[in-house]
Amino acid sequence: MIPEFSFEFPTVIEFGNGVSKNIMNAVNKEGAKKVLIVTDPNLREIGMTKAIEEILAENGIEFVVYSDIQQNPLFSQVDAAGNLARDEGCEMVIAIGGGGPMDAGKGAGVIATNGGSIQDYMYMRGDDMKIPENKFLPTVCIPTTSGTGSEVSDCIVITDSNANKDLMLTVDIAPDYAFVDPELTFGVPRHITQNTGLDVLGHAIEAIVANLESQIADLFGYEAIRMVFKYLPAAVEGDKTAREYMSLASMYAGIAESKNGCVIPHAVSCPLSVHHKVAHGLGVGLAQVANIEFIKDEVPEKFEAIMEHLGVEYEPGKAADKLIEMIHQLFHDIGVDERVDIGPVTEEMIKSFAVDASRQIDIEGSPRQPVELSDLEDVFRKILVM
Ligand SMILES: [Fe+2]
């Protein structure tokens, strides 16, 4: 029996080379006269926001820029951006960048109209979590990497001052507009293309196996997996057509993970990312094989469906093993080691990483339950240079 599901998708998408120059379509539709641009300092410095700033100026739209966003944005940065939007009377947020600036921009839209701190609205607050009362500022996302899918997702991930990641999850926080312009990714360095591409693969696989199920979201996941295997190696080498397809794959996988959630690899990536600066997508990618080993007997039909959508032949009962084989080959083809070296690793560190990972919402999405601390410790042992 197909489980019941619903599918709500509020984001208007424009996709294609150069579409970020159509930004006035969104600004005019909202009737905004002043906007807040949210980005990170590096992107501002290399001029990634310049074209948008010029288009706004040419059309008589005032803007202020908040660019103090780090890779894992902090509550304080989201609050500062939101307060700036309110104090300056901005009527719209335009977020330009990777997942950090896009999540921060989406969060700023909440604070601009609701006040307080974004921390008040986050999942980890449990029973103390507040529900925002006012409609958020309209938000536009313009991704400059192909990884997070934040331009189409119903969530934001923000980090507290103790380096714990937390999230806000509501369809109301999905951007109103996404301008997905692959040209913006053509200059992205090789290592970022590797890491963000692995994040796309993770979103797609994890969304399909997660125990939240939307058949529509799964469709986006299948197609994203196909595109990652086909195009990521060439995208890493700088091929522009392949990078266009990775922009599409990232968006598709973002839709899939936004609706179905993620599982163990996203939880495992958290402590590595916040404490050891392992790129989010790399941590996610490294944990895929260990996760598939952990769940393959629980949901064999999910792996069969993936293989059937990919059109890849597999021995009966061995669909998950075939996917593992393909992932090993992908790591080889994109030139990424399947273990990451964070320096000397002690058993205490492994235990502490497992406790951190166990607190992430992604654990609840795992189709195999319970997920014990020892299971998570095993994943860390498999992906770290010990
Ligand atoms: Fe991710």
Image (spheres, helix red, strand yellow):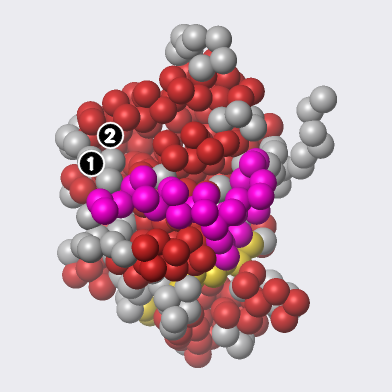
Q: Amino acid at mark 1?
A: Asp
Answer whether residue 300 is visible to the viewer in this image.
yes
Mark 2 lies on a secondary structure that is: helix
Callout 2 crowding tier (Cα within 10 Å): few <14, some 14–19, many ≥20: some
Quadrant location of the N terminus in the rendered image: top right
Q: Nearer the viewer, residue 13 or 197?
A: 197
Q: Residue at x 59, y 21 (%)?
A: 305
Name the residue carrying label 1.
337
Q: Residue at x 57, y 41 (%)?
A: 207
Q: Nearer the viewer, residue 46 or 225?
A: 225
From which residue to which does the magenta span run?
A: 358-386
Look at the picture and state if 128 lies above or below 250: below
Look at the picture and state if 96 lies above or below 115: above
Image x and y of residue 36, in percent: 44, 75
Name the residue carrying label 2.
331
Horizontal side of residue 66 vs 119, given as left or right = left
Callout 1 crowding tier (Cα within 10 Å): few <14, some 14–19, many ≥20: few
What is the distance, in whole Å, between disc 1 and disc 2 at their CAs? 7 Å
Identify the disc placed on residue 228.
Answer: none
Q: Residue at x 69, y 37 (%)?
A: 214
Q: Residue at x 65, y 53 (%)?
A: 364
Answer whether residue 29 is visible to the viewer in this image.
no
Q: Nearer the viewer, residue 139 or 68?
A: 68
Mark 1 lies on a secondary structure that is: loop
Image x and y of residue 91, in percent: 54, 75
Q: Is residue 93 magenta?
A: no
